[in-house]
Amino acid sequence: MISGNGVVHGNSIHHVSVNGSLYPSKTKSRRQRWEVKPSEMANNTLNPIRAIVDGMKLTPNPDKPMIALSIGDPTVFGNMPTDIAVLQAMKDAIDCQKYNGYAPSVGYLKSRQAVANFYTCPEAPLEAEDVILTSGCSQAIDLAISVLCNPGDNILVPCPGFSLYKTLAVSMGIEVKLYNLLPEKSWEVDLKHLESLIDERTSCLIVTNPSNPCGSVFSEEHLQKILKVASRHCIPILADEIYSNMVFPGCSCPSMASLSSDVPILSCGGLAKRWLVPGWRMGWILIHDRNDIFGSKIRQGLVKLSQRILGACSIIQGALESILNNTPQSFYNNTIHFLKTNSEICFSELCTVPGLNPIMPSGAMYLMVGIDMDRFPDFKSDVDFTERLVTEQSVFCLPASAFEYPNFFRIVVTVPEEMMVEACGRIKEFCERHYCSGSHDKDCEQ
């Protein structure tokens, strides 16, 4: 009801007439002093890698040029350029001037269809409506977790595993439960441990294959066992397959969706790694529903969530069909050959170093190395070990504590071959200097 003086009564909100217009004004809205605080989400957001690396004292040896084996970016050293066909696709998309505006939040239909065509298979068919284009695979993972989980739920995350899963989940009030990978079994999942973590609030199982940080590739048989656990407990899977098809010769890597008969899967991927363009920020979610378990609500949820940032880069979307269809097989083969050769060099060199236990990868672009800390009494932890490696040898490897897996470090194998050989030589020299055959012997004390 509006009174004669222009005031609306009710709900403690007053509408005051100003120049003939009605404007709402809340009572007691004036603050007495400035007090701007960060949100709980901001306070709860923490990247474990940054938390550890930013606290390290990284002062390289001035007599040795720095070799960074820590960054999962294949473009850093310039030795792994993308293919000319990929660049031409981008040039054409720019020159045609058709992709300078907003695209639909889920992506252009033509671009989504191109991704569907590229990844479809008889066991896991895809149509354009099954594809959501995103700003990199990281956003795909963000959307997948967001659509499947509520605050108070928990998700199952591999350990060691990509740190972003925890960063995203914890910021949303979602509990992270780490399931173990077994280094002695080439980083296969500890299935019993995985199953022991499941409860009524478990809303998502994340499977990374091929693996960052391990470089491991699960066999079809092992993937089937993981699917059986998910099926028994009716838990959907988020399959992080950004390194899909980046596997060494003699090793196969079927998608999880192609093996699933009843477990619904959101598969996340993108251009970043296989096409060597991480900065282009083009990713996607492939919706593999089974028995209409996701149904329309999960799809609608993904559409709504995608509208928060109004979609992926339109220029890259315009180039996407050409990138997927015209990149020659030789480009993929050359990339794999280089990664395998560098991995073999690193593995064979570090195998001869007492106190280190490298684990040969089967794909991706990483290699994990175990440290027998008892043999290196000069160091308190893998963080201390890798910090001193920088100080003495100017070689930076990422301590696996960043992946919540202490006493290991991760090596990125994308550096030029001669640099990999040099780095391994320096690591060997470092370890020989600090290695102790018995950690409690007096001759080990310095």
Image (tube, grey):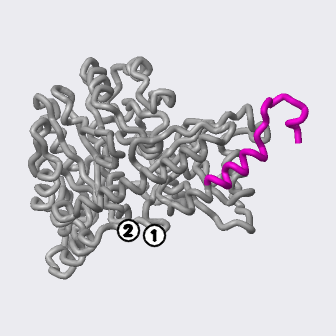
The image quadrant that residue 318 belongs to is bottom left
User: Residue at image x 33%, y 65%?
Assistant: 280
Q: Quadrant of the C terminus?
A: top right
Inspect the image, locate mark 2, and give the three-letter code of the amino acid beneath it. Pro
Placement of 310 over or under 384, stated as above or below: below
Q: In the drawing, what numbered circle is on residue 81?
A: 2
Whole-percent x, y for residue 254 in the image: 25, 38
Whole-percent x, y for residue 295 in the image: 12, 35
Q: In the drawing, what numbered circle is on residue 267?
A: none
Whole-percent x, y for residue 9 in the image: 25, 51
Report, in whole angstroms, how far the alpha carbon at label 1 lies from the one at label 2.
6 Å
Q: Residues within 10 Å of mark 1 (few under 14, many from 20)?
A: few
Foreground: 351 or 173? Answer: 351
The image quadrant that residue 62 belongs to is bottom right
Inspect the image, locate mark 1, and give the three-letter code of the amino acid beneath it. Gly
Whether residue 87 is in magenta: the answer is no
The image quadrant that residue 308 belongs to is bottom left
Callout 1–callout 2 Cβ contact below 8 Å: yes
Q: At numbered mark 2, what does the secondary structure look like: helix, strand or loop?
A: loop
* Residue stretch rendered in magenta on the structure: 424-446
In this rendering, position of residue 152 left or right of residue 260: right
Placement of 201 over or under 397, stated as above or below: above
User: Residue at image x 23%, y 48%?
Assistant: 285
Foreground: 135 or 303? Answer: 135
Q: Residues within 10 Å of mark 2 (few under 14, many from 20)?
A: some
Q: Which residue is mark 1?
A: 78
Q: Give the overall secondary structure of the magenta segment.
A: helix
Whole-percent x, y for residue 390 in the image: 68, 56
User: Residue at image x 67%, y 34%?
Assistant: 372
